Amino acid sequence: MFQNLQDKLDKALHNISGRGKITEINIAETVKEIRRALVDADVSYKVAKDLTKRIQDKALGQNVLTSISPGQLMVKIVHDELAILMGGENVGINLSGNPTVILIAGLQGSGKTTFSGKLANYLKNKKQKKVLLVAGDVYRPAAINQLKVLGEQIGVEVYSELENKNPVEIAQHALDYAKQNKFTVVIIDTAGRLAIDQEMMNEIRNVHQAVTPQETLFVVDSMTGQDAVNTAKAFNDVLNYNGVVLTKLDGDTRGGAALTIRTVVEKPIKFISTGEKMEALDIFYPERMADRILGMGDVVSLVEKAQEQFDEEEARKLQKKIAKNQFGFDDFLNQIKQIKKMGNMKDLMGMIPGVGKAIKDVNIEDDAFVHIEALIYSMTPQERRNPAIINTSRKNRIAKGSGRSIQDINQLLKQFEQMSKMMKMMQTPQGRMMMQAMAKQMGGGAKPF
């Protein structure tokens, strides 16, 4: 996420690191590199110029404390200004209304339909809402089919009228159906076009007037840079929407849309979407995004993702098993499933301070656990419960069943044994104290200022 921009900002800020004090000359050099990095990331020149002017004004005349170097002070200033540029603080989604109506708008290919499914999944599982998805794209049969597949995948009903080509009528009928069946949220996926045209704008305006949504969200493909910002402005002139959704942030995005859109349309970014998994949707926090852009990681979001998958009852059962030395491969599989639900592995690791830069050139596949799962699924229930019984003949059978080598099995067994010992150690008072100390250290190291 924003790797190219992160690298260039890191290089720009490196220029002032190690300097004894802030001067007009070294500030001017640093600011010039920051502006160049922003423009290269497809941030509009005016926005980049205004931002760097504010950074320069704040930096000049600052007294550098003995505990803070000029480099650290500059990082803090840049971090704060980036966060302000992206909105300053999080703006939540409006869930008032009975039912709440959420209208999804955007160009074709921006990720509207996938986002609609992700939002439905988020509201169903995290907000305990009864959600109805509405297939309002009457021009693309594939969009209706896609929405139905997503709805089935997440257990959310999809309302559609295959013979009706009037999106206003479909939206109104869907709203009546939702009221009759006590749905609490209605998400309407509207039609997109390859480019903005008057017919499209009239249609989306008519749907908006007919259902008077509590929340209108504009979905933007973040890979399109300034084009995304221009499109967002055109839609806002017609709809006056409530917020923006940035999609495809896991792709080759330069970051220009995220950094510019808030200033241009004066509407908050509410969600960011990465990947195709229905769980891959995050609430947008400007400060946390500034952390990521500057390579500081995002420990808070990482902990929140872990807590979402955390089941207290399961944790208690697991704790008892560990204490009795009964932790087996079935339990290990459950832990893997929970980790996979948290999202893309490389993105998750990038949230740990300092790790993002270390793994930027490392290819971490999303199916990183597939070989481990193959080995475990090739074991008998008895072997999973008691790995100690796995001897040479059993290893040969597991290797054949999984398509892996004996060395892979040996490595897995060794890692499992080490992990089991570590987990058992964590149950002791000394282990808990050590974990608390590590947590404090990580929390304190999230920001170098």
Image (cartoon, rainbow, N blue to C red):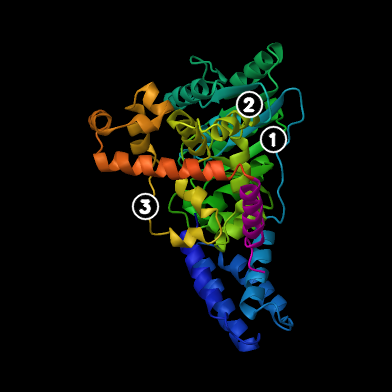
Residue indicated by mark 2: 124
Residue 49 picture quarter: bottom right
Label 2 secondary element: helix
Determine the main secondary structure of the stretch shown in magenta: helix
Above or below 37: residue 97: above
Label 1 secondary element: strand
Residue nearest the viewer, comparing 324 with 45 = 324
Residue indicated by mark 3: 363
Residue range corresponding to the magenta coloring: 429-449
> Which three-letter amino acid code belongs to the residue tagged 3?
Asn
Residue indicated by mark 1: 215
Is 346 inside the magenta-drawn segment?
A: no
The alpha-carbon separation of the residues under discs 3 and 2 comes to 33 Å
Of labels 1 and 2, the one closer to you: 2
Q: Badge 2: how crowded within 10 Å, few (<14), some, or many (20+)?
A: some
Residue 197 on image: x %, y %? 52, 41
Q: Is residue 264 visible?
A: no
> Going from the N terminus, do you reach mark 1 or mark 3 first?
1
